[in-house]
């Protein structure tokens, strides 16, 4: 028997007065975080929520998220975190698809009226019976008529609760995939999946010894990376979390200095944005490096040039890892105490096996490219209510990632691309990441994304979207000439489009789907 909420319960007893969650001027100790989560659990029971029921949560990186998250788990219910950028129609789909019985939603801002859209989605979902609004000011009344606020709920219920114990293979969280093909699917992750991954993430963040780690969380908590590798991992090991509601390089760097942050995780575009900011603003990186010990990167492939530049500027190593929502998420990383290989996502974590296979699920030789397949304690139960999609993803007992990679001679994994992102030009396989890595070495290129576009002559053609460095005067002809001299003739982009910025998801991944549609 187990429950993911024990992540905070043990420390509420052992180190009750230590800060667990910091957000601007709000500081919650482990005892306070646990007590507020107990109040949420009591409220859920009073609503009639039973163990195994689904409870949705829309919330940015503010203290409400961990309070409600662990409260739902304490009640034995299943947390369904939703992307904060979803619109009313999309919210209704997620509530309906997950069979959510209750929905906690942050009110948001005038620019992002989450509460309004969330309530509209709730009203359109008759199977969801309870709606609770989280207001920025806990004492404020609800701006939506007839709606209860979390502040009102917390005052009505006791700060103690006897946590409902669940089986290791009971679902703890349903994480919805981004839905790049068809409707988003909910990956069912168990208490065992989530706890084991939080424990495994200890080394990913260098957590150990007697020092109390302080982790800054700018990754959205509704996503598996921030939720497991930062929130659960740090609190499980008795650390301190500093929440940033929305990633902004200035805010993040200033918070790192003010809160003496020791650990940071991000997607590659976050590191790219911080590098650009310190260069333009003349920010003193030594103040960050005074406390920052270790960084990690995941979510998408880290351009080698960005990694090298960040480590040179900040003097802090970045450890790359790999995983997906369906793998809780960590499957591999460059582990401390072992040699690190730049450009590699390291070795499988303990208890996890990884193979590289061809289209017939046969292993390919070392050094050759194939699909990454994974099995172990981190693999989801399946996609909620989607047996056919589950069977396809988990065939032969292995989760098929859809990512292309290879093993080197030492067993380190190198990711090439998503299988669906590979471009086939005139019968030749072209891998966008390879093109992007080369183009990122051009002194005037700041960021690049490569996609395939339809071509009558070659089937697909290579197109690059490029963000130039500030004040760079690079032209399309100049860059294309440079590309021709630095890569094979079938690889270099035939079209280059300059942009001031590239479209990104809430987690900071470049939206190649949008670029393809332009």
Image: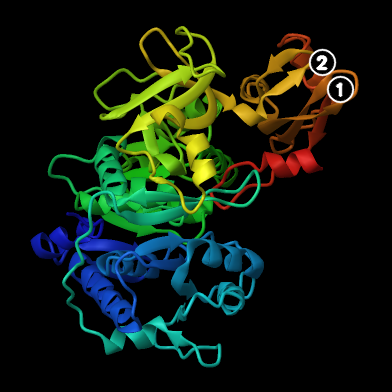
Looking at the image, which residue is at 39% across and 7% down?
409
**Left or right: 18 as drawn, with respect to 27:** left
**Left or right: 229 as drawn, with respect to 423:** left
Give the quadrant of the C terminus: top right
Location of residue 208 (image quadrant): top left
Q: Nearer the viewer, residue 53 or 90?
A: 53
Residue at the extreme left:
14
Residue linked to disc 2: 481
Q: Nearer the viewer, residue 102 or 329?
A: 102
Looking at the image, which residue is at 13% across and 59% down?
10
| Pointer 1 with pointer 2, Cβ within 8 A | yes
Location of residue 476 (image quadrant): top right
Residue at the extreme right:
456
* Image coordinates for residue 182, horizontal then vertical, percent: 65, 48
Give the quadrant of the N terminus: bottom left
Above or below, comparing residue 99 to residue 391 in the picture = below
Mark 1, Cα crowd under 10 Å, few <14 / some 14-19 / many 20+, is: few
Residue linked to disc 1: 477
**Left or right: 399 as drawn, with respect to 2:** right
Q: Nearer the viewer, residue 227 or 240?
A: 227
Could you say which disc has been placed on residue 43 in the image?
none
Q: Secondary structure at mark 2?
A: helix
* Image coordinates for residue 427, horizontal then vertical, percent: 76, 13
Looking at the image, which residue is at 53% across and 67% down?
95
* Image coordinates for residue 370, horizontal then vertical, percent: 53, 17
Q: Nearer the viewer, residue 254 or 231?
A: 231
**Left or right: 462 as drawn, with respect to 151:** right
Above or below, comparing residue 476 to residue 286 in the picture = above
* Image coordinates for residue 378, horizontal then vertical, percent: 34, 39
């Amino acid at each position: 028997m187990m429950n993911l909420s024990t992540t905070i319960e043990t420390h509420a007893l052992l180190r009750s007065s230590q800060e667990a969650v910091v957000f601007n001027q709000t500081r919650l100790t482990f005892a306070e975080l646990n007590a507020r989560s107990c109040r949420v659990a009591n409220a859920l029971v009073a609503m009639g929520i039973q163990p195994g029921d689904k409870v949705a949560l829309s919330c940015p990186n503010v203290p409400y998220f961990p309070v409600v998250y662990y409260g739902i788990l304490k009640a034995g219910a299943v947390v369904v975190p939703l992307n904060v950028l979803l619109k009313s129609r999309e919210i209704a789909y997620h509530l309906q698809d997950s069979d959510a019985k209750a929905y906690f939603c942050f009110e948001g801002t005038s620019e992002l009226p989450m509460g309004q859209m969330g309530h509209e989605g709730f009203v359109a979902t008759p199977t969801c019976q309870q709606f609770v609004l989280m207001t920025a000011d806990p004492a404020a009344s609800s701006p939506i008529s007839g709606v209860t606020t979390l502040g009102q709920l917390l005052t009505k219920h006791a700060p103690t609760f006897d946590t409902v114990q669940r089986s290791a293979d009971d679902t703890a969280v349903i994480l919805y995939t981004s839905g790049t093909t068809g409707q988003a699917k909910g990956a069912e992750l168990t208490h065992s999946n989530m706890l084991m991954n939080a424990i495994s993430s200890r080394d990913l963040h260098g957590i150990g010894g007697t020092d109390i780690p302080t982790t800054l969380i700018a990754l959205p908590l509704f996503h598996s990376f921030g939720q497991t590798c930062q929130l659960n991992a740090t609190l499980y090991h008795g650390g301190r979390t500093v929440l940033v509601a929305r990633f902004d390089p200035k805010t993040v760097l200033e918070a790192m200095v003010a809160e003496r942050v020791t650990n940071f995780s991000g997607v590659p575009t976050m590191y790219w944005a911080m590098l650009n900011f310190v260069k333009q603003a003349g920010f003193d990186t030594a103040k960050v490096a005074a406390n920052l010990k270790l960084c990690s990167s995941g979510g998408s492939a880290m351009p080698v040039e960005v990694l090298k530049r960040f480590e040179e500027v900040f003097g802090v190593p970045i450890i790359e890892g790999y995983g997906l929502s369906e793998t809780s998420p960590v499957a591999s990383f460059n582990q401390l105490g072992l040699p690190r290989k730049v450009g590699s996502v390291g070795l499988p974590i303990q208890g996890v096996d990884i193979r590289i296979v061809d289209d017939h699920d046969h292993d390919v030789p070392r050094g050759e490219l194939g699909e990454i397949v994974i099995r172990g304690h981190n693999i989801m139960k399946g996609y909620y209510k989607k047996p056919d999609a589950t069977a396809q993803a988990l065939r032969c007992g292995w989760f098929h990632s859809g990512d292309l990679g290879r093993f080197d001679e030492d067993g380190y994994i190198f990711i090439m691309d998503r299988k669906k992102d590979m471009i086939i030009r005139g019968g030749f396989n072209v891998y966008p990441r390879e093109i992007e890595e080369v183009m990122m070495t051009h002194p005037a290129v700041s960021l690049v994304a490569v996609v395939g576009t339809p071509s009558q002559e070659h089937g697909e053609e290579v197109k690059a979207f490029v963000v130039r460095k500030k004040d760079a005067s690079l032209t399309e002809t100049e860059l294309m000439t440079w590309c021709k001299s630095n890569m094979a003739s079938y690889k270099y982009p035939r079209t280059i489009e300059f942009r001031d910025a590239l479209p990104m998801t809430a987690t900071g991944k470049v939206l190649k789907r949008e670029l393809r549609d332009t």
